[in-house]
Image (cartoon, rainbow, N blue to C red):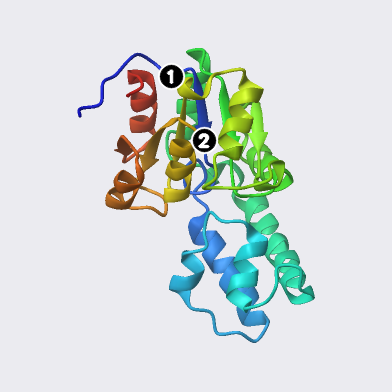
């Protein structure tokens, strides 16, 4: 059955890393540096596969240890120091082209905007503040804001409630299959982006009704309407 457009979305729920901020490369590089410093020989493909997922689970998986192990805690502390330095150096330059302008356009058009990220809430707030786009978002949620993170629907439903918008009136924008799967589980439409970690085919197969190649394309897709 062909999807039909019914009008513009109300709420727009954005992923952060790989969707608004060009951080995947830095995440991989910093993670590999931390692992190497712990005497490990990291596999880049394995590290890259963890981008967009919670930090504690990532290091637990990469180190082969329990998430609450002291070595995992040490790795996370080292990673956070490295990422904070990168964030302080790059600041607004971390944003993908067109993000600041596109968010302004959506906000000015009356779309309430939210963040749903696998970062912790505090890490998300720091990144948004450093890049200068924090004021655009009515709601920010991290994986520690809900019981279950992506791809469970909890975060998407949480931010929809906070926005005061029905789930069916929201669209999720993200670069990973977990973003799309979260959206579909929550009864929301999903727009994928091809410039992050996910490819067009995998995002489409996960349920994205369109995959945007730039942030200008994201704004156009959101403004065009929703599908059913």
> Residue 27, position in %: x, y?
56, 61
Residue 9, labelled with which disc?
1
Write down the residue under mark 2.
14
Mark 1 burial class by Cα count in 10 Å: few <14, some 14-19, many 20+: many
> Residue 200, position in %: x, y?
29, 48
Viewer-side residue, 12 vs 20: 12
Task: Identify the residue at horizontal 61%, vertical 30% (top origin).
Answer: 159
Mark 2 burial class by Cα count in 10 Å: few <14, some 14-19, many 20+: many
One can see residue 133 in this view: no
Give the secondary structure at mark 1: loop
Task: Identify the residue at horizontal 75%, vertical 65% (top origin).
Answer: 77
Viewer-side residue, 164 vs 87: 164
> Residue 211, position in %: x, y?
31, 39
Viewer-side residue, 42 vs 228: 228
Q: Are marks 1 and 2 in contact (CB under 8 Å)?
A: no
Q: Quadrant of the C terminus?
A: top left
Task: Identify the residue at horizontal 50%, vertical 56% (top origin).
Answer: 24
Which of the two marks, 1 or 2, is nearer to us in this view? 1
Give the secondary structure at mark 2: strand
Count every numbered label the image shows and give the total: 2
Q: Can you say whether 150 is above or below 61 in the image?
A: above
Task: Identify the residue at horizontal 47%, vertical 38% (top origin).
Answer: 185
One can see residue 127 in this view: yes
Q: Quadrant of the N terminus?
A: top left
């Amino acid at each position: 059955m062909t999807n039909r457009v019914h009008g513009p979305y109300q709420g727009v729920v954005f992923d952060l890393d790989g969707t608004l901020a060009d951080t995947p490369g830095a995440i991989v590089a910093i993670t590999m540096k931390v692992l190497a410093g712990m005497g490990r020989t990291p596999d880049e493909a394995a590290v890259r596969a963890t981008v967009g997922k919670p930090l504690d689970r990532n290091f637990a998986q990469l180190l082969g240890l329990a998430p609450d192990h002291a070595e995992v805690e040490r790795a996370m502390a080292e990673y956070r120091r490295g990422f904070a330095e990168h964030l302080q150096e790059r600041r607004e330059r971390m944003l993908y082209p067109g993000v600041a302008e596109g968010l302004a356009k959506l906000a000015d058009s009356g779309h309430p905007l939210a963040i749903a990220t696998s970062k912790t809430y505090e890490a998300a707030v720091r990144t948004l503040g450093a890049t200068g786009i924090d004021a655009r978002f009515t709601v920010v949620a991290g994986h520690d804001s809900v019981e279950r993170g992506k791809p469970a629907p909890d975060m998407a439903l949480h931010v929809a409630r906070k926005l005061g918008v029905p789930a069916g009136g929201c669209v999720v924008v993200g670069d990973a299959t977990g973003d799309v799967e979260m959206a579909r589980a929550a009864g929301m439409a999903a727009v994928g982006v091809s410039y992050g970690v996910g490819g067009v085919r995998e995002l489409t197969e996960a349920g994205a009704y369109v995959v945007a190649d730039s942030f200008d394309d994201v704004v156009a897709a959101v403004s065009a309407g929703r599908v059913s």
